[in-house]
Image (spheres, rainbow, N blue to C red):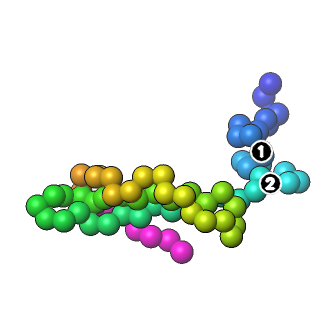
Amino acid sequence: MRGSRRPSVPGGIDDPHVATRPAPKTVLLTLTPAVSPAIGYTITAQFQSASGQPFQTLFSNVSFPYGRARDLGCGV
């Protein structure tokens, strides 16, 4: 049906007019430059189920053997 908008993501996070939102969760991805002669980075991922909860390490120091992307940056 053209014109009707149905949310594509459970919880309404893709709808700016939704009345409630799911509880926030946090994922931290840390890229550390690889030690020479390796190229690229190692990646560590951590997950926090709710504010104030401890972070759980999902994986640590996994090789990511790709050079820096031209537009790689960090936003605050």
Residue 42 appears in the rendering: yes
Residue 16 appears in the rendering: no
Q: Quadrant of residue 40?
A: bottom left
Look at label 1 and name its amino acid. Gly
Marks 1 and 2, how far apart at CA: 6 Å
Mark 2 lies on a secondary structure that is loop
Q: Quadrant of the N terminus?
A: top right
Q: In which quarter of the image is residue 71?
A: bottom left
Going 18% across and 58% down the picture, which residue do you hit?
39
Q: Give the range drawn in magenta.
A: 68-76
Going 28% across and 52% down the picture, which residue do you hit?
63
Tell me: 75 left or right of 4.
left
> Going from the N terminus, do you reach mark 1 or mark 2 first?
1
Look at label 2 and name its amino acid. Arg
- Magenta highlight on residue 26: no
Q: Are marks 1 and 2 in contact (CB under 8 Å)?
A: yes
Residue 21 - label = 2
Q: In which quarter of the image is the C terminus?
A: bottom right
User: Measured from the top left, where is residue 8 in percent x and y?
Assistant: 71, 37
User: Measured from the top left, where is residue 23 in percent x and y?
Assistant: 76, 56
Vertical placement of residue 73 versus 38, above or below: below
Tell me: 7 left or right of 68.
right
Q: How many labels does the image show?
A: 2
Tell me: 17 left or right of 14.
right
Vertical placement of residue 2 versus 23, above or below: above
Q: Nearer the viewer, residue 29 or 14?
A: 29
Please give the residue where the numbered disc 1 appears in the rendered image.
11
Q: What secondary structure prevails in the magenta region? A: loop
The residue most toward the right is 19
